[in-house]
Image (cartoon, helix red, strand yellow):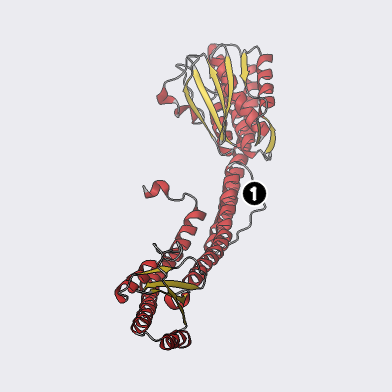
Amino acid sequence: MFRRYAPKSLYLRVLLIVILPIFLMQSFVTYIFFARHWDRVSANLSNNVAGQIALITRLYSETAEETARTDIVDWALDDLDIQMRFEPGGTIPDNNRLSPFNVYNVVLNNRLKSRIDQPYRFDTQSWRDYVEVHVQLDEGELVFLVLRQRAFATTGPIFLFWLIGTSLLLGWIATVFMRNQVKSILRLANAAEAFGRGRDAPDFRPAGATEVRKAGFAFMAMRERIKRHLDQRASMLAGVSHDLRTPLTRIKLGLAMEKDTPEIEALRNDVLEMERMVEAYLDFARNEAADEDPEPFNLASMLAEVVGNAQRTGGTVSLDAPQDIDISARRSALKRAVGNLVNNALRHGDEAWITVTPSERNVKIIVDDNGPGISPEQYELVFKPFTRLDEARSLSESGVGMGLTIVRDVARSHGGDVRLSESPKRGLRATIELPV
């Protein structure tokens, strides 16, 4: 349950780790202050006030002379800061008037109840700075006005204000610092994601904490090694393929001058097959060495060009793509990948269908055909270079087994992939999935 509801992003998790202990500590301090210190102080203050009121009430009720009673009123004001008056024939209110914001009404009531024998009522609502206490006597009632700060500990709201204020301040400071630290990690993640989609991200510079900078420099070194490896592999393939053309040309010329015999015809076919393999090598090398930068373009327009090229060679291709989809990719490479899939579909079927299904996270380019298809066990096998399934279909460009290898290479260089599955048209379905 905790994993289900816990924050998923690093930023929120770090904030939770930093801020949660702050608020837990502040809550613990608040509990200790209110449950131990403030409660005890308020109970003592209420007990003192209740005792003083009880003493004054006893003195007043046991004294009949008016002069003595006047002296008691003066003493209460001068020595105890308690204002009091006597209302002959008066009666106490029917109920207490309690402020809903005073959490210590019960404490004062218990203290008055334990100290005063006569009926009483008290009012914590009518006066902002005073607590009014009514005590019933036989000939009337005594009304006492006691300073609120003498009956309760009134520093609680100030303490809560400073407690909440400091908690918010500390939380804000932690949020600012954590955001700056996580921002450098997000920049590193965005640079890695861009590189995975075929973009160089030249503006990336390692920043942040030492560990984040170290990871950033490691990423930059890894990126350079990968680029050098790709360039070296493409150069090697191009060089080897180019160098093979010269001896193949000489062999073709030599075979052309020989008499037509079954053995010579077989050798000529082998040379043609080798030429197609060399061309496939060169095509793959050109795709590896392509320095085309990703750029935004309309996907439906590019796919319409693929359909037009296929139709000019006599193929039947249908296109179903929304007209408002713009993606950022290497246009020529993606066009070539889709063209490979369409050519492969027309080679082994009578018709091809191209469908585009966009979503919030990716866009799928689906190519269906009505050919014989292949078994699911061979779906991954056909992506290996120079793999040919002669018993059913070769799934290759020019019959040498490089078509789907190039398609997958293009898709993965954009941060996506290509998958094969059974088509609703009873043939094979190839799906290129690209992130948006």
In the picture of the structure, the residue carrying the numbered disc 1 is 201
Report whether residue 430 is seen: yes
Residue 192: give x, y in percent of width and height. Answer: 57, 48
Residue found at x 45% / y 72%: 132
Quadrant for the C terminus in the image: top right
Looking at numbered disc 1 in the image, what kind of residue is underneath it? Answer: Ala
Residue 58 falls left or right of residue 345: left
The part of the image, by quadrant, that contains residue 169 is bottom right
Q: Is residue 74 above or below residue 290?
A: below
Q: State the count of labels.
A: 1
Q: Position of residue 294 (x, y in %)?
A: 67, 39
- Image location (x, y in percent) of residue 374: 45, 19
Q: Quadrant of residue 331?
A: top right
Q: Quadrant of residue 31?
A: bottom left
- Nearer to us in this view, 136 or 222: 136
- Residue 96 in the image: state x and y as whole percent: 40, 64
Q: Is residue 243 above or below residue 156?
A: above
Front-lying residue, 304 or 93: 93
Q: Is residue 264 visible?
A: no
Of residues 149 and 71, the one nearer the viewer is: 71
Going 49% across and 31% down the picture, which residue do you hit? 384
Residue at horizontal 53%, vertical 58%? 215
- Residue found 52% across the figure and 13% down from its top: 370
Q: Secondary structure at mark 1?
A: loop
Compared across the picture, whether 377 is left or right of 265 comes to left
